[in-house]
Amino acid sequence: MKSYMRILILGVLFVFSLVSFSIVSSAAKKTLEVWAPGGKIWEDTYQEFQRTHPDIELKFVPLTGGFDERKQKLLSAVAGGVPPDVMWVDRFEVSQWAAFDALTPLNKYIPKYKLSPSQYIRQTWDEAIFPWDNQLYALPWQTDNRIIFWNKDIFKEVGVNPDKFPITWEEQLEVNKKLTKFDDKGNVTRIGFAVVEGLGANGSEWVLGWANGGEYMTARSTKVTLNHPKLVETLDWLVKMTDVSGGVEKAAAFKGTWGIEVQAPFFVGKIAAMINGNWTFENIARYAPNLNFGVSPIYRRDVYLKEKKLVPITFSGGHAFAIPKGAKNPEDAFEFIRWITGINGTRAYRNASIAFSKSMNRPWAPIIFAYQAANKESLEALAEQPVTQAIKDGVKLSFDLMAYTRFRDRSPAALLMQREFLGHARDEALYHKKTPKQALDDATRTIQAELDRLLDEWEKRTGKKLR
Amino acid sequence: MTKFKRNKEEIITAYIIILPWLLGLSIFIVGPIISSLMFSFMDYSIVLPPKFIGLGNYKRMFLNDPLFWKSLYNTLYMTVIGVPLNIVLALSVALLLNQKLKGEALFRTIFYLPSVVPQVAISLLWMWILNPQVGLINYLLSLFGIKGPMWLASEQWAKPAFIIMGLWGIGGNMVIFLAGLQNVPQHLYDAAIVDGANIWQRFRYVTFPMLSPTIFFLLVMGIIGTLQIFTQAYIMTAGGPMDATLFYVYHLFNKAFRDFHMGYASAMAWFLFIIIFIATIINLKLAPKWVYYESE
């Protein structure tokens, strides 16, 4: 019995010494803990950082799981006082993290590193600023946007001009009716023009609202204006567009038959036209290289109705790198996020992604970086890729559209706004449970109540007044 | 004296041996339970220090959050309809499979199989089965000339769809019933037959009373489990359409991890605990009226 006790005590001592040893040794070296995506491309990029920064010991922890899971992990680390030095965040959530004081403001580093907002796509930089205190909380890494894609063969088949996408809402509704197809039992077999997120489109509601002259919030995000008359009008049109397929339930039932990759609905003719993300280009190159498709920007409806002028508009999201509050090594952390979002980091990432695609025998098309100069290099790299001219032109168009892009309003209630708008108010209107006006009025009240609570708390804590 | 010393040493050793479990229990279970009770009276956003607000969270829950009531309704709907249905079906299948038939082991296995499939896989599979256009259920209905509903895409049918899906997993309850049935002594049936009891009377006066402790156990566990329903809605419907499948725990999850309102979510959790507690007390109080224990 006694020897058993001795072994136990020795064991406990051994574990303790291991722990204390690792604490001491980690304090002696300058480590940088980064929580960011994993995989071959990213790991190659981190390796390049490590190679060019031998004095920093990069400790990379891959973020796994979905959006919710990643958020929980970061949240518990920050709350527990053991945050990483760098974390990868959805840019649209930066304001929520900032409002809860979970991130380090980066403004003081800007002059030291001679950074300027003009080096980045302006909107992506602005999206990383928390509008209540006007501080920058992250450096933008990548972005995206939304455009109209259509299948020219289907357009020809139903007798619609395949070379020009209709511009007005009335024309688009007509074309949608012409393109939408049913079987003899009344089931939808093709959606004409997908404009509802989750039913074939992506990010469409946001951009269509702006295109119509609507605003979702006031400039400093203190007031919700989701029931803006122009947004009500937009939702009303979305309902009409959805009713073309016999109502939202039928469209949702049809969606259940869709596949992915080569079976994606747009590639197999289950969707004739759609508003979707620029990542579609790489997917076309990879899964449907022979697709006869056209692309067009979404145009500002308000400007067109007034001046008959075509001004594009699009919607961008994307990711950023931030430094959590309480990070132990903020100086190196900033060097890391500056490097990885800058010309060298994006170059390393691009090279790694080209090499990876090549090793997998896949076509490659670039993502859009937030760093302006990086995108020029991306287009040069694309020119040498064996993809069709249509893909190259489309990618070029999506890059050019960044000048016209907008982002979702930044606020700590951004996620609630997304849920209330797309998961709630929009559905109530699509299901004809409420009129678009009622639905948006109700959602506006709910979000405003939450925003007021957050504002009260924030004003009290910081001593600043916004209202 | 020496004996006492040895005892003391044994006690210490025992504590050291159970220490990992004891630490685990107090740090990961008792600790969070106590702190969640405290947080339910606080405004707590996880990252910022908590602030005491009295009954603020509870007031907001009852008076200012329509989704709270909606999610509670959805959850009670699942419990009130789903749990009894599940038990009745599991019992019926168990009675059928309790016959001495050729291949009974095979049938039992088949009925039990779905219970070993993970919830996530079940959810993904059922999204296909429930698909209104190409799904199995509506195809079978169409053979009888019935036009099946839109299931998960429909506000009215989404919850029933989940209940039907739940019935696929009766295997677990069925096995427990089968075990219960094995314990019904044959001599009771023999006596009943001698007394001229027909098959229904034998079920009503022999099988049912003898099985009542099992039914009671499954009822209590079923209610507790269903009140915490989450995974299916998270994977299959994201709470939609129009919050028809926004269950209580899903709403709680949204509040806690998506909106950072940990205090509010804690209050919700404690209210759920109270509901489960009351439901269980009621069950226990009603039990003597219908549950029969042989030892009594």
Image (cartoon, coloured by chain):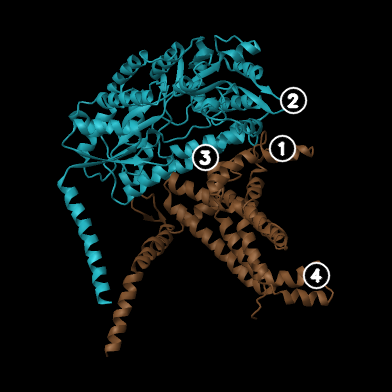
Chain colours: A cyan, B brown
Q: Work out whether residue B204 can be spotted.
A: yes
Q: Which amino acid type is marked by label 2?
A: Asp
The numbered dot on residue B139 is 1
Q: Which residue is mark 3?
A: A445
CA gap between label 3 and label 1 equals: 43 Å
Give the secondary structure at mark 2.
Answer: loop
CA gap between label 1 and label 2 equals: 15 Å
- Which image quadrant for residue A33? top left
Relative to A246, B252 lies left or right = left
Image position of A113 with respect to A162: above or below: below
The numbered dot on residue A203 is none
What residue is rendered at 20% in x and 26% in y? Answer: A114
Q: Work out whether residue A245 can be spotted.
A: no
Q: Nearer the viewer, mark 3 or mark 4?
A: 4
What residue is rendered at 32% in x and 83% in y? Answer: B7
Q: Which residue is mark 2?
A: A184
Q: Position of residue A225 (x, y in %)?
A: 49, 32
Relative to A466, B286 lies left or right = right
Q: Which amino acid type is marked by label 3?
A: Arg
Q: Chain of mark 3?
A: A
CA gap between label 4 and label 1 equals: 39 Å
Q: Closest to the observer: A464 or A260?
A: A260
Q: Nearer the viewer, mark 1 or mark 2?
A: 1
Q: Position of residue A382 (x, y in %)?
A: 37, 16
CA gap between label 2 and label 3 equals: 44 Å
Tag 2 and tag 3 share a subunit:
yes
Label 2 neighbour load within 10 Å: few <14, some 14-19, many 20+: few
Q: Which amino acid type is marked by label 1?
A: Tyr
Report the quarter where the N terminus of chain B lies: bottom left
What residue is rendered at 36% in x and 13% in y? Answer: A383
